[in-house]
């Protein structure tokens, strides 16, 4: 027993004036969101994906304004004459890549004439046989239908649209065989009035004058009325610059529009719609799911039956019917994706709130008099945030991919807007000849999907409360 212990055997181990106190904490208290950010930073793949997403958003915001070309009209003939140009990037072109060159196969007569033409100077870079340069009728090439050469494609397009069409000699042969009188320069010949002729001469747009015709002035018969048939430098008239000074980083589309600008314009539209769909689906689905999961009972039963009815309607039917009735306006696409899109958020919210509503800390908060709103928002919602944020991070690329897929299939066809899916559809039709029209829009979709998937995985781990404090 303690009472029988001899006190003389006890040893005092501290002085009476010595005080024992707790040591102060040497680190600051870390909140839930700060701890989540610290865990997220340690995931290098997710952090790299976050940086890529920020870069993509930067180009979406400023990309459409980085390369501005003052084309006469988006659907004009002048713009379409600049179609299918290959990518050319300043500085990088000196490395032999993205230099605006292309390998083409054309008839020997056409190449020979272009090689010695003053307007065609510098177009053929390599591949032109020396025998054909010296003698177009060289016997070694008598039965050769086409010669493959490497050309500066910007200058080449300017040549065939401004000076001599590719079918120039073919039309001449057809005239000889069929006895027709088709104009071989018809595709490049332009007729100008006196005023337009003087304007183009002042700007040095005119290459040469093919003919001058005098006719009766319809407004004043006493004055002569002249019409000038000329060949015009298409690059100068459309872009106000020469081919060697022109850079399309991703090339041009079939209509002559800058593919770099078109991709980011289409991406902006897709992401704006994706964010709109996400906000609507979140507000509707998560609110209804949280109420059903937390309160349960009759309310849960009614919501479940309603969701089952709505989810049984095929999405493609909803999308098709809305497009047939209202067209492919942007609000129609948003409405179609939100008509049934909130159901996923509903099930997520219902499952998570039903799972956590009877946990000990929730019962303790309810015992202390916390309101239902405070319990749902303060105690349950943070524990469900990891799964919810992950799902929503993946919802954005899922919408972009779905919208691009339906646009590629032709179901969604915007009349006055650009879509990445529509660009992929156009590129797929000519991918064997002009592969850049398919590669760059597809790369955007692929990079966006991979980056958001890695980003979503990182958010899921970062917002998981069970991992708090775990290294």
Image (spheres, rainbow, N blue to C red):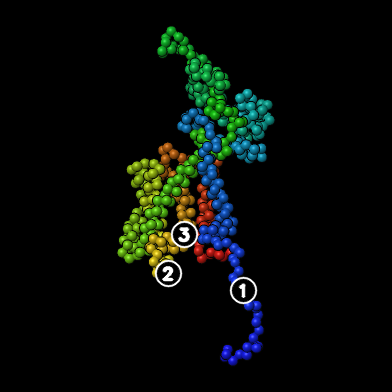
State the quadrant of the N terminus: bottom right
118 vs 365, nearest the viewer: 365
Answer with mark 1 or mark 3, whichever residue precedes in sequence: 1
Q: Is residue 117 above or below residue 217?
A: below
Q: Marks 1 and 3: CB-CB under 8 Å? A: no
Q: CA distance from mark 1 to mark 3?
A: 46 Å
Q: Which residue is mark 3?
A: 385
Q: Which mark is residue 44?
A: none
Instruction: Bin the neighbour count of mark 3 within 10 Å (Cα to Cα): few under 14, some 14-19, many 20 and up.
Output: some
Q: Which residue is mark 1?
A: 19
Q: Residue 66, position in %: x, y?
A: 55, 37
Q: Which residue is mark 2?
A: 364
Q: Residue 215, position in %: x, y?
A: 45, 12
Image point 59% across, 32% down: which residue? 246
Q: Residue 13, position in %: x, y?
A: 65, 80
Callout 2: SS = helix
Callout 3: SS = helix
90 vs 214, nearest the viewer: 90
């Amino acid at each position: 027993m303690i009472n029988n212990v001899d006190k003389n055997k006890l040893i005092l181990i501290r002085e009476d004036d010595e005080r024992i106190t707790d040591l102060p904490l040497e680190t600051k208290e870390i909140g839930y969101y700060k701890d989540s950010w610290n865990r997220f930073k340690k995931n290098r793949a997710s952090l790299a994906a976050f940086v890529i997403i920020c870069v993509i958003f930067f180009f979406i915001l400023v990309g459409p304004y980085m390369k501005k070309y003052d084309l006469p009209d988006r659907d004009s003939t002048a713009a379409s004459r600049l179609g299918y140009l290959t990518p050319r990037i300043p500085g990088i072109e000196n490395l032999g890549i993205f230099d605006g060159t292309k390998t083409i196969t054309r008839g020997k007569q056409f190449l020979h004439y272009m090689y010695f033409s003053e307007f065609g100077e510098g177009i053929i870079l390599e591949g032109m046989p020396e025998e054909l340069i010296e003698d177009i009728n060289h016997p070694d090439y008598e039965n050769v239908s086409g010669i493959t050469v490497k050309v500066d494609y910007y200058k080449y397009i300017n040549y065939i649209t401004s000076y001599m069409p590719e079918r120039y000699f073919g039309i001449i042969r057809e005239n000889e065989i069929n006895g027709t009188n088709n104009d071989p320069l018809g595709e490049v010949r332009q007729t100008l009035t006196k005023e337009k002729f003087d304007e183009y001469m002042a700007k040095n747009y005119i290459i040469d004058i093919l003919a001058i015709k005098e006719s009766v002035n319809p407004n004043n018969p006493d004055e002569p009325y002249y019409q000038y048939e000329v060949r015009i430098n298409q690059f100068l008239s459309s872009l106000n610059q020469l081919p060697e000074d022109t850079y399309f980083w991703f090339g041009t589309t079939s209509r002559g529009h800058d593919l770099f600008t078109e991709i980011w314009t289409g991406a902006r539209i897709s992401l704006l719609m994706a964010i709109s769909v996400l906000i609507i689906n979140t507000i509707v689905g998560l609110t209804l799911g949280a109420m059903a999961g937390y309160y349960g009972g009759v309310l849960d039963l009614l919501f479940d039956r309603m969701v089952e009815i709505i989810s049984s309607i095929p999405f493609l039917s909803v999308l098709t019917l809305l497009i047939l009735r209202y067209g492919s306006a942007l609000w129609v696409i948003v409405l179609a994706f939100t008509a049934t899109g909130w159901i996923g958020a509903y099930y997520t919210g219902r499952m998570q709130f039903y799972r956590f509503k009877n946990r000990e800390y929730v019962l303790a908060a309810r015992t202390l008099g916390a309101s239902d709103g405070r319990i749902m928002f303060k105690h349950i919602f943070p524990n469900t945030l990891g799964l919810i944020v992950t799902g929503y991070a993946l919802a954005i690329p899922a919408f972009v991919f779905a919208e691009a897929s339906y646009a590629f299939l032709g179901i969604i066809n915007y009349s006055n807007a650009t879509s990445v899916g529509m660009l992929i559809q156009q590129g797929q039709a000519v991918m064997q000849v002009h592969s850049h029209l398919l590669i760059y829009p597809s790369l955007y979709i692929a990079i966006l999907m991979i980056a958001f998937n890695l980003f979503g995985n990182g958010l899921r781990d970062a917002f998981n409360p069970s991992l708090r404090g775990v290294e």
